[in-house]
Amino acid sequence: MRFLKYQGIGNDFVLVEGLHRHLEIDAEWCRKVCDRHYGIGADGVLYVLPGEDGADYTMRIINADGSEAEMCGNGIRCVAKYLYDREHAGGRFTIHTLAGNLEADVTASGGEAVSVRINMGAPILEGRDVPVDHDGRFIDQPFEADGVKFKANAVSMGNPHFITFDPLTDAEIDRLGPVLERHPFFPRKTNVEFCRVVDGKIHIRVYERGAAWTLACGTGACASTTAAALNGLVPFGEPVDVELPGGWLKVTVDPDLGYVLMDGPARLVFEGEVPCPFDDGR
C-alpha cells in the first residue's frame, strides 16, 4: 500500500488515500503501522476518503492504539496540504470529520501549501456534551486526581479536552497525564492539556487520548485557547500564539464562541510502500 508520512509541528501521521478506490479502515493494521520500532512510526493514521454530508472530502483518524478520534487538528492540516499539493483541491474546501464539516483555507507558495487555516467550528462547553460527568459548564472548577488538587476546564472541539492553568510540578504533570486520560469523570476518556500563559502566549504540554505524550495537538491548542479566553487570560477575537513541544500555532476564538480558527504548518516527511496487510514479523 502506498503511504505518505506527514507531520504538523511534530504530531506525525501515516496518510493513506482512498479517493478513487475502496479503502477499508483497519484498526489493527493502523496499530502495527504506527509502532515506532516494528512499523513506520506515527501518532496515528489519516484516511483521505471521498466527501460525505456535503463536504468535498472526508478525513478519518485512527490513533496509534487503534482507537478512532473524532477529530485531529494537526492531522486535518496535513490532509489539507496533501489535497492541495496533489492538485485534488483548490485553496478553499471542506473536509468531513466525525466532528462535522470543517473549512480549510490554504496559503501557498510556489504551488505548495505552506500554511493551513482551519475553521474548527464552535467549542462545546456543556459538560454532558464534552463529555464529562458534570451538568453545565465545567470552567475554572476544582478537581482532584491521584492526590493532586487543581482547577480545570472541560472543552470539546469535537473531541474532549481537560485543561489546567495551575502551576503544577513536572513530576505532578508526568503522573497526572495518564491518570486523567482514563479517569471515570470522562466517559470517553480525554485529552489533557497542562498550560502556562506568559506574556499573552500559551505554552502547553499534551497527554493525548490514545497516543500518550505528543509533540502537538491542534484541537488541544484550540480548546486551551478557548479555556484561557473564558478565564480572562487571553483576549477573544485576536490571534493567540500557542506553543507546543513541536512548534507554534495561532488560534483565534470568536467572542460569541461561534468558531475557533487554527492556523499552522504541515510538512511531508517521506513516502513509500508498505505491505498490506502489514506484517511486523512478530
Image (cartoon, rainbow, N blue to C red):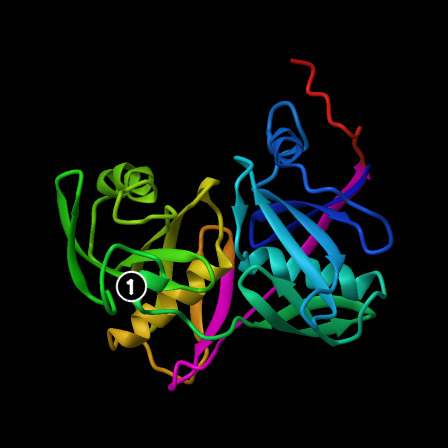
In the image, residue 257 lies at what x, y percent?
39, 81
Q: Quadrant of the N terminus?
A: top right
- Residue at 38% over, 86% down: 256
Q: Residue furthest top?
A: 282
Horizontal side of 243 relative to 184 (left or right) equals: right
In the image, residue 270 lies at what x, y percent?
76, 44
Horizontal side of 261 relative to 94 (left or right) equals: left
- Residue at 29% over, 63% down: 127
In the image, residue 156 lies at what x, y percent?
40, 63
**Who is closer to the viewer here, 96 or 239?**
96
In the image, residue 206 lies at what x, y percent?
40, 49
Q: Amino acid at mark 1?
A: Gly
Number of marks in the image? 1
> Any magenta on residue 115?
no
The boundaries of the magenta stretch are 248-272
The image quarter containing residue 80 is: bottom right
Identify the residue position indicated by label 1 in the image: 127
Residue 266 in view, yes or no = no
